[in-house]
Image: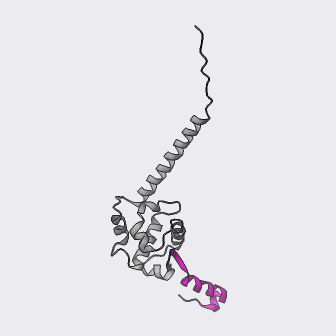
Amino acid sequence: MDLSTSVLGSTAAARLQELHSEHILIVGKDKLTRAQLARAECFNYVAAKNLSRALRELDVTSLKQLYDRVPPSALALPRIGVVSLAVLGAAFEAKGIGGSAPLENWVKSHQEHITTFYTIKRHEEEDVARERKEKRARKRRHTQPIEASVPTSA
């Protein structure tokens, strides 16, 4: 990339150079730059940052550990969608994990039958909605006034 300081200015050119070498996807000890993801034809850097945040919450120590131990359904999280999953596939590819079809092999290795990642997300959302509905119903039953049963004389 031509980062001409005479056109862009030294501050902008320096910042763009930093971004090029900055780690964009961090999964435990594994850190990938934009250039490494680009070699795997991945250019979805916002999704990579979202994926990094989500995987930090899952306490994953490496891409290999993720591949071996974390099922795809565990990534049915807010802000993680099919683009983030594609980024994950590119990360597996960049690190040489999972063979020629790392995303497919990852799903198969966990013996999860999924049609699409969207299906996993939809099922997760349905589970959350069902739990919320059950909680509201329990709360309504709990807060209803108790009617005193007074014996009537005949």
Q: Is residue 90 visible?
A: no
Q: Residue at x 36, y 72 (%)?
A: 102
From which residue to which does the magenta span run?
A: 1-26
Q: Is residue 148 visible?
A: yes
From the top left corner, tell me how far across and down residue 11 is, in percent.
Answer: 66, 86
User: Left or right: 109 with respect to 145?
Assistant: left
Instruction: Report if residue 22 lies within the magenta region.
Output: yes
Out of 20 and 137, give the one closest to the viewer: 137
Residue 121, image x and y in percent?
45, 57
User: In the figure, 78 relative to 135: above or below?
Assistant: below
Residue drawn at (52%, 74%), measured in percent from left and top?
45
Relative to residue 99, is residue 142 drawn left or right? right
Q: Quadrant of residue 141?
A: top right
Q: Is residue 34 left or right of residue 148?
A: left
Snapshot colouring:
one colour
- Displayed quadrant of residue 120: bottom left
145 or 19: nearer the viewer: 145
List x then y, in percent, for residue 40: 42, 79
Prevailing SS of the magenta stretch: helix
Q: Nearer the viewer, residue 10 or 152?
A: 152
Residue appearing at x 62%, y 84% in the figure: 15
Pinpoint residue 43: horizontal percent, then vertical percent. Answer: 48, 76
Instruction: Give the residue at x 52% y 75%.
Output: 26
Q: Tell how many labels.
A: 0
Q: Quadrant of the C terminus?
A: top right
Q: Nearer the viewer, residue 21 or 61?
A: 61
Q: Is residue 19 magenta?
A: yes
